[in-house]
Image (cartoon, rainbow, N blue to C red):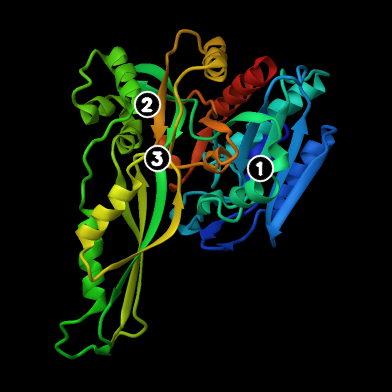
């Protein structure tokens, strides 16, 4: 039982963490149904009409619309995902699905990605409605399944089969933005205005099966290993976009350092360095291997999975170069391919997000950045909805927050959650 003296946003996040919604990918998932039912019941308790959509058993999506004061204004989608990546309990110092609060932190899988933001959404809306108020405009609250598998069994199906959920909406906010970093001992906030394109590929090597004791020159495992090593060691060149140039200018203003060496400038951001450097270039990381079935049998086939994140607009060029890297004997299969996005750091919503942070942390700059990963904003883009990352958190300088995404001992400070809920409530009241 969560401590009733804790702030509601922390209690809700803790409750959500205790639903094990692990998503192993490729349709193998525990499912979001119970977490979705919890979210639906909470929203119904606020007097909202809730819709559930479960296109695949246990892969449940939830939506509710909150009427705004000015219904002539375009609606804002505020969304999160209910699934999480798996957690190996033996690697953690706490039970990853206990939702434990310890040392001023909420621990558990989803504390950062992204049951924290789900709790902030729920409690921000609750604060407004319980006060007898309305948000400035209609809010479409959506909680998706399967984001950790590229949204194939979640937001992609919702957009395809329930587009009416988002009627009248032109913009959306979700995860991985609005959090603070410390740059040379000065705090700044990163606002996500774009995402790299996502391409998940499978490498397939074929050879001749045979006995493990033989001299064997046509070994599928050897071919695959060479291809995987070649990709894993490839360092893609820096290729800046309008967003990453703006990021570098913001970091330069904070530090006085030149923008001419992006990697060195990113190093001033401390623990966020690796997150920012990945936004300057394409990344291609091997993530899984599969081959063979017995120690003394050379298999006919070997496979590897590669997570490719591409600068928007360079997708075809990267795939062609990958084929050159691995050679003609390796077949490249595309498992998932999704768009990249970039939006100018301007406009009414951007100004409102920056202002909301400024009212709660005055004088601290807000800088745009390009997310090296992806969110369900990609799916909403097919409906013409412009997405941003805005899950506001004021974080301690020494916390490797970006390293918590999919990491061991994932945790978020309690006071950061309270701050984020206050900023988000401010935005929803005023924008």
Q: Nearer the viewer, mark 1 or mark 3?
A: 3
Which badge, 1 or 2, comes first in the chain's sequence?
1
Crowdedness near tag 3: few (<14), some (14–19) or many (≥20) residues, C-alpha within 10 Å:
many
Determine whether the residue tagged by mark 2 lies in a helix, strand or loop: helix
Crowdedness near tag 1: few (<14), some (14–19) or many (≥20) residues, C-alpha within 10 Å:
many
Q: What numbered label is drawn on residue 196?
A: 3
Q: Position of residue 407 (x, y in %)?
A: 43, 47
Rendered residue at 29%/34% (across/down)? 280
| Disc 3 to disc 2, C-alpha distance | 11 Å
* Residue sitting nearer the eye, 354 or 420: 354
* Residue sitting nearer the eye, 302 or 75: 75
Determine whether the residue tagged by mark 1 lies in a helix, strand or loop: strand
Q: Position of residue 188 (x, y in %)?
A: 41, 18
Numbered label tally: 3
Q: Which quadrant holds the C terminus?
A: top right
Rendered residue at 78%/20% (across/down)? 134
| Image position of 402 (left or right of 326) | right
| Image position of 344 (left or right of 203) | right
Which badge, 1 or 3, comes first in the chain's sequence?
1
| Image position of 24 (left or right of 222) | right
Determine whether the residue tagged by mark 3 lies in a helix, strand or loop: loop
Crowdedness near tag 2: few (<14), some (14–19) or many (≥20) residues, C-alpha within 10 Å:
many
- Is any part of residue 176 visible from this angle? yes
| Disc 1 to disc 2, C-alpha distance | 28 Å
Rendered residue at 54%/47% (across/down)? 109
Q: What numbered label is drawn on residue 143?
A: 1
Q: Position of residue 77 (x, y in %)?
A: 65, 32
Q: Which residue is mark 2?
A: 243
Q: Which quadrant holds the N terminus?
A: top right
Which badge, 3 or 2, comes first in the chain's sequence?
3
Q: What numbered label is drawn on residue 395?
A: none
């Amino acid at each position: 039982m969560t401590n009733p003296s804790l702030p509601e946003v922390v209690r809700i996040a803790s409750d959500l963490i205790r639903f094990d919604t692990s998503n192993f990918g490729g349709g193998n998932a525990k499912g979001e149904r119970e977490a979705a039912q919890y979210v639906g019941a909470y929203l119904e308790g606020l007097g909202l009409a809730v819709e559930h959509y479960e296109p695949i058993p246990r892969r449940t999506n939830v939506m509710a619309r909150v009427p705004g004061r000015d219904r002539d204004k375009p609606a804002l989608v505020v969304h999160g995902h209910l699934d999480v990546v798996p957690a190996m309990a033996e690697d953690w110092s706490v039970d990853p699905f206990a939702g434990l609060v310890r040392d001023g932190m909420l621990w558990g899988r989803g504390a950062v990605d992204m049951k924290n933001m789900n709790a902030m959404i729920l409690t921000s809306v609750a604060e407004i409605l319980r006060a007898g108020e309305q948000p400035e405009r209609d809010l479409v609250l959506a909680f998706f399944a399967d984001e950790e598998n590229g949204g194939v069994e979640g937001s992609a199906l919702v957009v395809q089969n329930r587009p009416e959920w988002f009627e009248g909406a032109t913009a959306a906010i979700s995860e991985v933005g609005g959090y603070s970093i410390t740059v040379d001992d000065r705090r700044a906030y990163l606002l996500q205005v774009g995402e790299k394109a996502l391409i998940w590929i499978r490498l397939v090597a074929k050879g001749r099966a045979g006995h493990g004791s033989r001299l064997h020159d046509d070994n599928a495992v050897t071919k695959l290993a060479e291809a995987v090593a070649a990709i894993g060691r490839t360092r893609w060149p820096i290729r800046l976009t309008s967003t990453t140039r703006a990021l570098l200018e913001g970091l330069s203003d904070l530090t006085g350092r030149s923008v001419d060496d992006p990697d060195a400038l990113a190093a001033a951001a401390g623990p966020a360095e690796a997150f920012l450097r990945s936004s300057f270039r394409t990344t291609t990381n091997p993530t899984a291997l599969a081959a063979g079935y017995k120690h003394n049998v050379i298999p006919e086939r070997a496979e590897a999975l590669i997570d490719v994140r591409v600068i928007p607009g360079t997708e075809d060029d990267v795939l062609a170069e990958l084929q050159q890297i691995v050679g003609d004997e390796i077949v490249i299969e595309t498992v998932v391919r999704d768009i990249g996005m970039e939006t100018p750091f301007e406009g009414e919503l951007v100004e409102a997000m920056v202002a909301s942070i400024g009212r709660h942390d005055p004088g601290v700059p807000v800088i745009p950045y390009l997310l090296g990963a992806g969110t369900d904003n990609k799916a909403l883009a097919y409906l013409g909805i412009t997405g941003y990352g805005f899950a506001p958190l004021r974080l301690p300088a020494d916390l490797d927050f970006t390293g918590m995404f999919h990491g061991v001992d994932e945790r978020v400070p309690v006071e950061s959650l309270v701050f984020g809920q206050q900023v988000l409530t401010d935005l929803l009241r005023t924008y």
